[in-house]
Amino acid sequence: MNILIVDDETRAREVIADMIRMYCNDSDISLEEADGVQTALAAIQRNAPDLLLLDIRLKDGNGFDLLNRIKHLELPVIFITAYEEYAIKACKVSALNYILKPVDPFELKDAIANAGKKIEREKLVERLDTFMQNYSGNERQVKRITLKTAESIYIVNTSDIIFCEADGNYTTFHLVDKRQVTVSRPLGDYEEMIASSRFIRTHQSYLVNVEHITRYERAEGTIVMINDNKVPVSTRRKEQLLQFLNSF
């Protein structure tokens, strides 16, 4: 579990991090820190954390400002603050827990453990949903996948995916109806999920549906999709693509 600690006080972040290392040492946890809204946004964009430990008062705003900026993401949050009066507001934004400073290490340990169980349950449900949507007889073939954002859950036919585009730990799906759906999971997860003869990796950041390729631009080293988007082809993946195109 990747945890982002957001607090404007360096010492407070250090204390929380030390507690996690000491009391949650039975879990595989990586930690990152931020002191404000902007630094937290950068960290979220860079590493897509699984859990946010968030103070109310920050260097350049407050915790609710940050949550408003990332409301399109499904990011569980535990507030850790000295301000008791914000507890009701925290409930309204579906915070998993609200811990008052000074932090009780056992309360923090339990809160993180419960958050980890919730995250794992949601991942398991998503995998089961995908399996049940696609299981037919003795042959498992992925025809539909579930894409979850903070606002919606999309059920998408894989045949309607033109290409997938990675940006760090986020993946954007470009669909035939011109929608773009961005989810906070890395491209590799989906490459494994929908791996078939229909999809091919042309670049570290792109997975394309071969049924929606219209042409290959030799000079530019790109392929053009049915929505006129140009997708780069890396040098080491060019041979694989050419072999596929020559197989027609």
Image (cartoon, grey):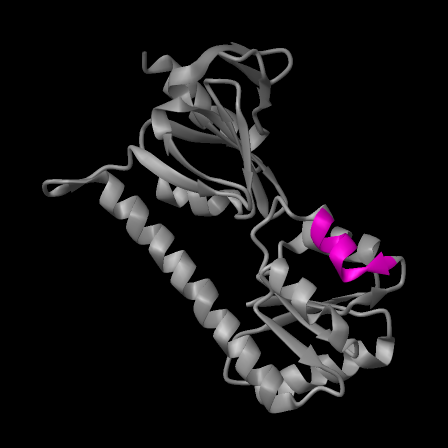
Q: Position of residue 119 (x, y in %)?
A: 47, 63
**Quadrant where the image shows the C terminus:** top left
| Residue 170 visible, this angle | yes
Question: Horizontally, is 211 left or right of 165 in the view?
Answer: left
Q: Position of residue 32 (x, y in %)?
A: 71, 67
**Quadrant where the image shows the N terminus:** bottom right
Question: Horizontally, is 171 left or right of 247 in the view?
Answer: right
Residue drawn 35% across the image and 29% down it: 157
Q: Position of residue 13 (x, y in %)?
A: 78, 76
Along the viewing direction, whichever of 82 and 51 lies nearer the viewer: 82
The answer to whether 219 is drawn above or below residue 206 in the figure is above
Residue drawn 25% across the image and 40% down it: 133
Question: Horizontally, is 164 left or right of 134 in the view?
Answer: right
Is residue 9 shown in magenta? Answer: no
| Residue 195 visible, this angle | no
Which quadrant holds residue 209? top left
Q: Position of residue 116 (x, y in %)?
A: 49, 71
Residue drawn 38% across the image and 31% down it: 156
Which residues, given as a range, are shown in magenta? 61-68
Residue drawn 61% across the image and 83% down it: 108
Is residue 64 shown in magenta? Answer: yes
The answer to whether 227 is drawn above or below residue 237 in the figure is above
Which quadrant holds residue 107? bottom right
Q: Residue furthest right?
A: 60
